[in-house]
Image (cartoon, helix red, strand yellow):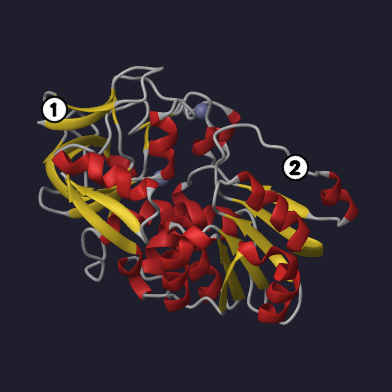
């Protein structure tokens, strides 16, 4: 089968390669991949800004149908529609693993960075990672359950966006659009910030319920504009862009004794005025990937329609068209770009 791989460290090039189809193992299933989302992390892996073990097939946002069931797997059958959590293996013994945070295990090996991922026709995953897809949730939008679980982890599990909160979000990419919907589902008022290059993405944010969208280029009046739109200064700032200036901007915009939530990754060290965290008595939280609990909550939000994943599906490309798909991500087209292997 064809698989989109990172070939080697120090090599920014990805390559579509012929690889053997995965064989099912005890405790595992093989999925026919129906859709796999391209994540900011995939771009970071391509540029060696995120750890990986090449040669490796990329793709960790996977939805599909069970094609083969390994020995000892109970409760799953061929033909079932599923999504899969992203950890292929963790140590199971460290403090993180034993306290419900497998995402922080130092020996975690995830699909799409250390083990073969979903940018291929088939992928092997542990059966313990599976979640059955509700009928209400189709392909390809189901591939967005993983990024939604990341957002749930950051906003609802490690922070607590609540009804009545005034929320400002930077970065109207797929993660920002999901964060926006989670905030609205929680009963918050939301302003989405982007740049002049984000006009189309900001329009989508507006359609998805943002109370206001603003381009940061209006910087001198931005504080006033954000406070006007929210009915006061922001209680919660959520950084989803992974662009360094956005972090500084949010430290400025968030109110005293407010909360700052870091979701985006910069891929490098950035410079920030951390004194603001003290002067304003901010509560800062970050999150890394997902835990099983965030998947259950993400699926509930998607199944009930509190969050529309379909609305965040941007464009889909065949696997052989991966270069155009990656270009679309770089050009910041609105919504999630997905590969259909
Ligand atoms: Zn991702
Ligand atoms: Zn561990």
Disc 1 + disc 2, Cβ < 8 Å: no
**Quadrant position of the C terminus in the picture:** top left
Crowd class of label 2 (few under 14; some 14 to 19; many from 20; radius 10 Å): few
What numbered label is drawn on residue 23? 1
Q: Position of residue 129 (x, y in %)?
A: 33, 43
What numbered label is drawn on residue 334? none
Which of 217/206 is in front? Answer: 217
In the rendered view, would you say 53 is above or below 196?
above
**Quadrant position of the N terminus in the picture:** top left
The answer as to whether callout 2 falls within 8 Å of ligand 1 is no
Task: Name the side, left or right, on which 169 lies relative to 137.
Answer: right
**Element at label 1:** loop
Quadrant hosting residue 120: top left
Is residue 161 in view from this perspective?
no
Q: Position of residue 246 (x, y in %)?
A: 64, 52
Which of 193/230 is in front? Answer: 193
Mark positioned earlier in the residue sequence (1 or 2) = 1
**Element at label 2:** loop
Q: Position of residue 123 (x, y in %)?
A: 20, 36
Task: Name the side, left or right, on which 232 lies relative to 1.
Answer: right
What numbered label is drawn on residue 272? 2
Is residue 320 in view from this perspective?
yes
Q: Position of residue 181 (x, y in %)?
A: 48, 70
Residue drawn at x 26%, y 36% as measured from the top left: 125
Q: CA distance from mark 1 to mark 2?
A: 48 Å
Residue drawn at x 50%, y 38% as measured from the top left: 103
Quadrant hosting residue 299: bottom left
Name the mark nearer the viewer: 1 or 2: 2
């Amino acid at each position: 089968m064809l698989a989109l791989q990172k070939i080697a460290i120090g090599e920014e090039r990805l390559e579509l390669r012929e690889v053997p189809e995965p064989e099912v193992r005890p405790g595992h299933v093989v999925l026919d991949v129906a859709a796999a989302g391209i994540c900011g992390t995939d771009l970071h892996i391509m540029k060696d800004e995120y750890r990986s073990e090449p040669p490796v097939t990329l793709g960790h946002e996977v939805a599909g149908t069970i094609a083969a069931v390994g020995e000892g797997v109970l409760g799953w059958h061929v033909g079932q529609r599923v999504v899969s959590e992203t950890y292929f293996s963790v140590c199971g013994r460290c403090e993180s693993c034993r306290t419900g945070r497998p995402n922080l295990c130092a020996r975690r090996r995830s699909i799409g960075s250390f083990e073969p991922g979903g940018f291929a026709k088939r992928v092997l995953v542990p059966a313990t990672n599976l979640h059955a897809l509700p009928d209400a949730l189709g392909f390809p939008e189901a591939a967005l359950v993983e990024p939604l679980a990341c957002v749930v982890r950051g906003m609802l599990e490690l922070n607590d966006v609540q009804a009545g909160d005034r929320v400002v979000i930077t970065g109207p990419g797929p993660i920002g659009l999901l964060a926006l919907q989670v905030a609205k589902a929680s009963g918050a008022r939301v302003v989405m910030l982007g740049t002049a290059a984000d006009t189309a993405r900001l329009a989508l944010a507006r359609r998805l319920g943002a109370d206001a969208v603003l381009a940061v280029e209006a910087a001198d009046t931005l504080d006033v504009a954000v406070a006007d739109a929210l009915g006061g200064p922001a209680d919660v700032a959520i950084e989803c862009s992974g662009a360094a200036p956005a972090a500084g901007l949010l430290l400025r915009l968030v109110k005293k004794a407010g909360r700052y939530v870091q979701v985006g990754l910069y891929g490098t060290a950035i410079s920030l005025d951390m004194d603001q965290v003290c002067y304003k008595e901010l509560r800062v939280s970050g999150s890394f990937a997902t835990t099983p609990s965030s998947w259950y909550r993400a699926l509930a939000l998607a199944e009930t329609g509190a969050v529309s994943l379909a609305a965040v599906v941007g464009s889909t490309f065949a696997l052989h068209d991966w270069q155009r798909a990656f270009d679309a991500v770089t050009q910041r087209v609105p919504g999630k770009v997905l590969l259909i292997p």
